[in-house]
Amino acid sequence: MGYKYRGTVRDIEEQAIEAPEPESKPAPVFDPSKCGRYVGYKQHRHFGQEACPPCKASLAKYSRDYRARVRSGQSVVMKTFSPDKCGSYAGYAAHLRHQAPHCQPCLVAHADYMHAYRAKRKQLKKVA
């Protein structure tokens, strides 16, 4: 078999290309120990099953708690803010996610990140 490149015909040898076999992962299995919690309800949904009564009750409780938090003006994020990553861009993102006021180290880290990001984008635009 050949192909044409800049006016000349080149020959190539045909080689059989075999596709790699996909890695097989074990299929997920329904875990009945999770029933009676919100995660159990989500598991029922994942497997396309009708949820059991304890799982439906846990969904109702989760929904009531969520709506109560929204109505009261509280943060709807379940976990509390942990300042472990303060002073980094990840810390800045955690402040946003938890609707917490930003600390000065996180604001500085965000500014540095955005400065580097904009410089990189500007450099890429010049090359292209």
Image: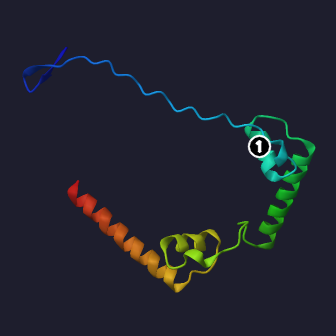
Please identify the quarter of the rendering in which residue 111 is found. Answer: bottom left
Looking at the picture, how far across and down is residue 2, in whole percent?
16, 16
Mark 1 belongs to which amino acid? Gln
In the depicted structure, whether residue 11 falls above or below residue 51: above
For the N terminus, the image quarter is top left
Query: Residue at 61% of width from left, 78% of height from top?
Result: 83
Please identify the quarter of the rendering in which residue 29 is found. Answer: top right
Please identify the quarter of the rendering in which residue 121 is found. Answer: bottom left
Q: Nearer the viewer, residue 22 or 56?
A: 22
Looking at the picture, how far across and down is residue 86, in whole percent?
54, 78
Query: Residue at 65% of width from left, 71% of height from top?
Result: 98
Q: Residue furthest right?
A: 53
Query: Residue at 76% of width from left, 73% of height from top?
Result: 73
Left or right: 117 as drawn, with respect to 3: right
Looking at the picture, how far across and down is residue 33, in whole percent?
84, 46
Residue behind mark 1: 43
